Amino acid sequence: MKQPEFDFYDKTSLKSYNLDKTMRYQLDMLDTLDVFTRKHCENVASLTCRLCEYLHCNKGFTEYCTICAYLHDIGKLFIPPSILQKPGKLTDEEYEVMKTHTTLGYEMCMKDLKLRPYAAGPLYHHEALNGSGYPQGLTKKDIPYEGQIIRVADEYDAIVSKRQYKSHVGISDTLKILIDETKPSVTPDYSGSLGHLAEEVKLGKSNAVIVRTLFKVVIDDIGYEITCTQGYLDSLSDDMKRFKKMEQYKEKMDKAKKDKDKNYYLEGIKILLKPGETVENFEQIHQEYIEAYDTRKKIIDNLYSEIKNIKKLKV
């Protein structure tokens, strides 16, 4: 019995785009990255593409933004592996080195005529609306829209990957973290001396509209996961009916007095067997199918609850 694995990023519109030679060149740059960073770049690009479509961006901008997202971490080529792949928390000094991947990626793109149009991806994806980001500490008015979109996709995938989700169950906790990113770090006191604070102080790090749009993408993906899981359940259900029939034959075979009747029911069992199943082991396999069915059924129930939880969230 093959246990299907759900891919968070399988439902992507990237496949609908024709990858011309120029675009393939840009995507091939990912092959020079380590496997984990490359996978992250692919995930962020897929999510960015989805966000652009839900935000009703035109196709040209969506394609542009998606490639920017593919290349957003290309500067990590120049980060020492001891820092890039460090399993624990980075020291302050190591973090400063890690932050340079934004400018290093930008410079790499600017030196390559084919990559130059997409240099915004590496440069802006860690900028924050309230000016607390890097490398330039820009505020909302100076951060391109593509940078704001990629930031949200990047944050989401980083958390999802770190928590190693196998399903969208519990994903609302991740979205709560992103909601916090949209809130200002300082609450202006309009009755006192803080009433004159600059507009950026009232902002959080991430664009609330984009985060809210991410909710729609996630809910749609949960619906897709439910459909996939339900399809698997339907397949299990069909096999469970077959096993039930075999058990009925075995029960009658055990009760039969005549060898003729025993052989009749035995042949009935053999006809229903599939590769890997035998008269001796099919009952154990049936039990495994029942357990798998119950597990997946609980996942579906939890996914429906997750949708309800997400719809209650406020940005």
Image (tube, helix red, strand yellow):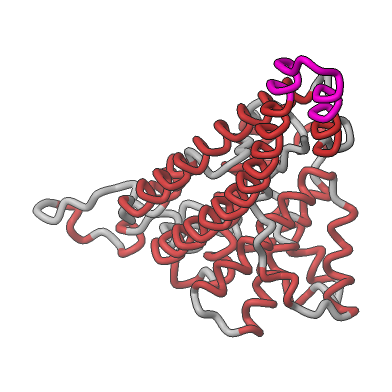
114 or 298: nearer the eye?
Answer: 298
Residue at the spot 26% in from the left edge and 59% down from the top edge: 197
Q: Can the viewer see residue 95 in this picture? A: yes
Q: Quadrant of the N terminus?
A: top right
Q: Quadrant of residue 4?
A: top right
Question: Which residue: 83% across, 45% down?
Answer: 35
Q: What percent of the width, then of the height, locates residue 73?
A: 73, 55
Nearer to us in this view, 3 or 244? 244
Q: Residue at x 62, y 61 (%)?
A: 47
Residue 108 at x, y percent in the picture: 82, 63
Relative image position of residue 288 (x, y in whole percent): 68, 26
Position of residue 74 in the picture relative to residue 193 (left or right):
right
Any magenta on residue 260?
yes
Q: Is residue 119 visible?
A: no
Q: Quadrant of the C terminus?
A: bottom left
* Left or right position of 192 against 157: left
Q: Is residue 31 above or below residue 107?
A: above
Q: Is residue 211 above or below residue 18?
A: above
Asked if residue 70 lies in the magenta stretch, the reply is no
Q: Position of residue 268 (x, y in %)?
A: 81, 34
- Magenta residues (range): 250-266
Relative placement, left or right, of 189 versus 265 is left
* Residue for point 57% across, 55% down: 227
Q: Is residue 276 above or below residue 150?
A: above
